[in-house]
Each structure stands twice: as structure tokens, then as C-alpha cells.
Image (tube, grey):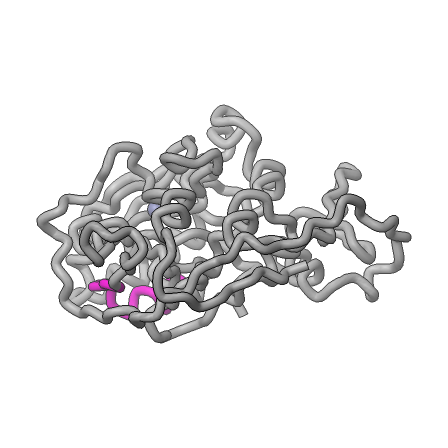
Amino acid sequence: MIKYFLYYIPVISIGMLVGSLQSCESANSQNPYPKTDAIALSTTVDTNIIRTDSNQREELDTIPPKIPKPAETSPEGLQRLIKAYPNFGLKATENELIWKDGTKMVYDDGKEKDFRNLLNSPDLEDQLASMEYPMGETEPPKRGEDPGRVRFEPFFFKMYGKTKEEVRENLVQVTWMPKTYGNKLWVTKINGVNKKIEAISKELDELKHLHKYLENPGGTFNWRKIAGTDRMSMHSFGMTIDINVSYSNYWRWAIKGGDDEGKKIIVFKNRIPWEIVKIFEKHGFIWGGKWYHYDTMHFEYRPELIR
Ligand SMILES: [Zn+2]
């Protein structure tokens, strides 16, 4: 279940929270973000109210037995997965996703999770339904809004490959903006991600006023864990692209509040135009600029979250 508890208190050790969250989600394992570029052209200061996750949560020790029922009674989130990934012959029961080879994944593990546990041990339901991804132009994300960062990893391992070698078997080269740049990028052909990136690239190639944001893309495939966490970077699966690092902003650059951990807040900064975001979204990609823990160069293929 997706009950995670938030409450408002003015001072709390946000360092504990921030420390538990992943660092850079980019393709680059070293810090790829030149600090000199962290200039806020548009700055929105987050509310002074610190909203944080409490440690209160209830975890059920046992999951009640579920009796498989026909697909029409399965949760909406499961139906969205089936629709978003049509090449996998996915099926659903009342509380399971079933793959063509018979692999079953429980949808709702019946556990209540706080923010940290949503990131670290989500189920498929949390991936689909804990935070709705807002389409198009949106306000700067608030604390607790990280739509798309809740990922049930076994799903991505099963879909794109469990190891670097397995993922590599499905990588193909695409030419990024052939009329203007022509970088060769390795991306997966699973789910036609290569075709989608080619289509995005073709569209962007025609929009000269956007080119500076798209020159020298920061990276695509890179098998690794997110620094400081046990979670895989989505770059590991070859369905994620970082655009120009020089015009990107990242939440860790923008923590304000001096030495007092409890008063630290993340100041939202972004320079990526909505026009680029909308083109990626149209092709099934979500944008890291819609996360409180933002990463504005980052786009990943997550069609199950696109409405
Ligand atoms: Zn990235």
C-alpha cells in the first residue's frame, strides 16, 4: 500500500533524509557537473516549511494469500504496464504481473512504506502509483515529489538484462541529431527505444534555437549503481539519456541553509526549455527536472508513467 507519512515540522535532520537518497543519476560515474555551470537562470526557492518523512510506518509481517483472478479484475497499474510494454506478452492476475516465460511478480506487497523505503524497497504498485508523473509544463517539484524515481528493479532487470553483458547484447548505435551533431550513442533496441531516440533526435535537429541544450549529450548506457546507494542507475539499462551537461542543474548543487542540517532546503534550478521536455514525453520518456531531487539533463524511457 502506498501510505507514507509526511508531516510538517520546521527543523529536522534533513541530512538523514538527503544522505539516504541517491546522488547523481547521470551516466557519468565521476561528477560530470561542472560547478561553474550551476548558474540559476530561473530560480524558485522552495517553501520555508520543511516537510519530511517520519519514521512512522507499519509493516505487515505477512502478505495475505491472493487468489489469481482474471485480468479484468487486476489493478489499473498492472493494466498500464501491459499497455506500456506491449512486446512482452505481459499478463495480469489480481495481484501479479506474469511474463511470457511464467515469471511472476507480485504487484502489491501489502507493506506500508515511508519515503526512504519507497525508494529502497518498492513493489510494482509503488512504481506505478506512489507518485503520479505530471505531464507538460509544471510547477517546481515539492519535497516528496520524485515521480519516476520509485522503481521496482527486478522489472527492469527482467526487461533489459540482469547483467552488463545481457544489456549490451541489446544495445545498438543511434546517430544523435545527424544534420547538426552526429554523435554515436549506444541505446537498447528493447521496446524500440533506439527508434524513439532517433525520432526525438530528428525532431530536435529541426529546432535550431534548442541546439545548445542538445550538443554533446552527457551519456546513455553506463552499467553502474547510483553513487552512495545500492540502486541501479537507469543508465544501466540503455534506455536513458543525459543531454548537454553544461546546461543542466542537479539538486546536490543547490542545497541551501548553511551549516544547520535541519534548515537545509533544495533550491530548484532549471535551464532546460519545456519544448525539449514535451518532445521527450511525447515519445514515452520522463524528465528528471520533475523531481524534488532534480537532475535536469536526465530523460528515461518510462511509458507506464506517461498519461
Ligand atoms: Zn541521467
Q: Quadrant of the C terminus?
A: bottom right
> What segment carries the magenta color?
268-280
Residue 128 shown left or right of residue 90 in the figure: left
Coordinates of residue 139 in the picture (x, y in percent): 34, 75
- Toward the viewer: 274 or 188? 274
Image side of residue 151 versus residue 196, left or right: right
What residue is rendered at 21% in x and 48% in y?
A: 245
User: Residue 174 versus residue 307: which sits nearer the camera?
Assistant: 307
- Seen at 51% across and 49% down, the residue is 116
Q: How many marks?
A: 0
Residue 142 versus residue 147: which sits nearer the camera?
142
Q: Is residue 12 visible?
A: yes
Q: Does the image show residue 90?
A: no
Residue 156, placed above or below residue 145: above
The quarter of the image holding the N terminus is bottom right
| Position in image of residue 93 (x %, y %) | 82, 54
Figure check: 114 above or below 132: above
Identify the residue at horizontal 28%, vertical 54% (top origin).
Answer: 251
Q: Is residue 277 magenta?
A: yes
Q: Position of residue 293 (x, y in %)?
A: 36, 55
In the rendered image, the residue lying farthest to the top is 165
Q: Inspect the magenta stretch and tell me whether residue 150 lies in it.
A: no
Kindly identify the residue that appears in the image at 12 percent across and 58 percent down: 39
The image quadrant of residue 171 is top left
Q: Position of residue 95 (x, y in %)?
A: 78, 54
For the residue pair 65 and 270, the one nearer the viewer reads as 65
Determine whether, in the image, residue 271 is placed left or right of residue 60.
Answer: left
